[in-house]
Amino acid sequence: MNSDAHTPTTRRPRVGSLCSGYGGLDLAVELVLRGELAWYAETDRHANRVMAARWPGIGNLGDIQHIDWGTVPRVDVLTAGFPCQDISNAGGRTGISGPKSSLWGSVAHAVGELRPSLVFVENVAALLRRGLDVVHRDLAALGYDTRWTCVRASDVGAPHRRDRLFLLGHHRDQPWLGADAADAVRPRRQRARPPIRPARPDRGGPAQRSATSDADRRGVRVEP
């Protein structure tokens, strides 16, 4: 594996994508961080057609349950929109341990093997009640501090609600991405944009929370 994957440089951050779907999360991360997709892992044939059209020539690693991560190029950023069927209110509601959503375990394993500086996770807002504690526990054990928020599609101008949870994990022993990436984010933060309404109390709490891994990395400390 490439041992200098986390050395600050002026190059564009390399992004790896798990459970990629149609690549919406990856497009956003590329745009904000000026990153470039190095590889992705997706098994749905319809989604793969979209990914191949958007990122021609980028390799698909396939099923993340059967990947030898020791042979995979290291990345600075890892994204994951793992299956929501068992978490969603429209699904079985069995939670993150369900037959589909338990794929999170393979995502966490990949994070531990690749140790990227940043991890972006997306899922339905019901993850707040059906598995966010597991996500925090696993990432804390790997040394990641996290921040998360819930955003509706209607918060950014769409005509429908589509409430989603977005989580950012930063490895406490890894540097933040280089100044070039920070500069890429700064002007976008200064632009006017539709206000994001805070989450209602009945949707699981404040709009934005954070969790810090404890000293032994056995759990998390939640902060407002």
Image (cartoon, rainbow, N blue to C red):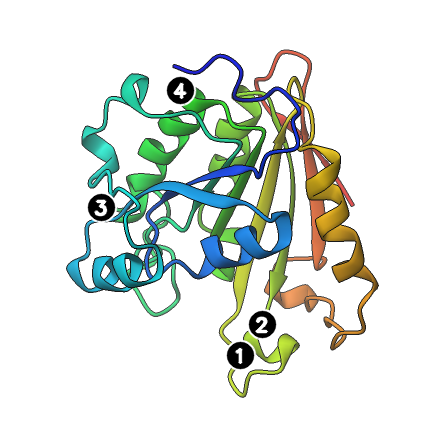
Q: How far apart in space, not on screen, are marks 2 and 1 (Cα)?
A: 5 Å
**Three-letter residue code for mark 4:** Glu
First in residue order: circle 2 vs circle 3: 3
Residue sitting farthest toward the bottom = 159
Callout 3: SS = loop
Residue at the location (47% across, 30% down)?
A: 75
The tag on residue 3 is none
**Three-letter residue code for mark 3:** Pro
Q: How far apart in space, not on screen, are marks 4 and 2 (Cα)?
A: 32 Å
Q: Are marks 2 and 1 in contact (CB under 8 Å)?
A: yes
According to the image, label 3 marks what residue?
99
Residue at the location (71% across, 50% down)?
A: 184
130 in relation to 103, above or below: below
**Three-letter residue code for mark 1:** Arg
The tag on residue 152 is 2
Q: Is residue 129 visible from the viewing direction of this image?
A: no
Q: x, y percentage for residue 79?
A: 46, 44
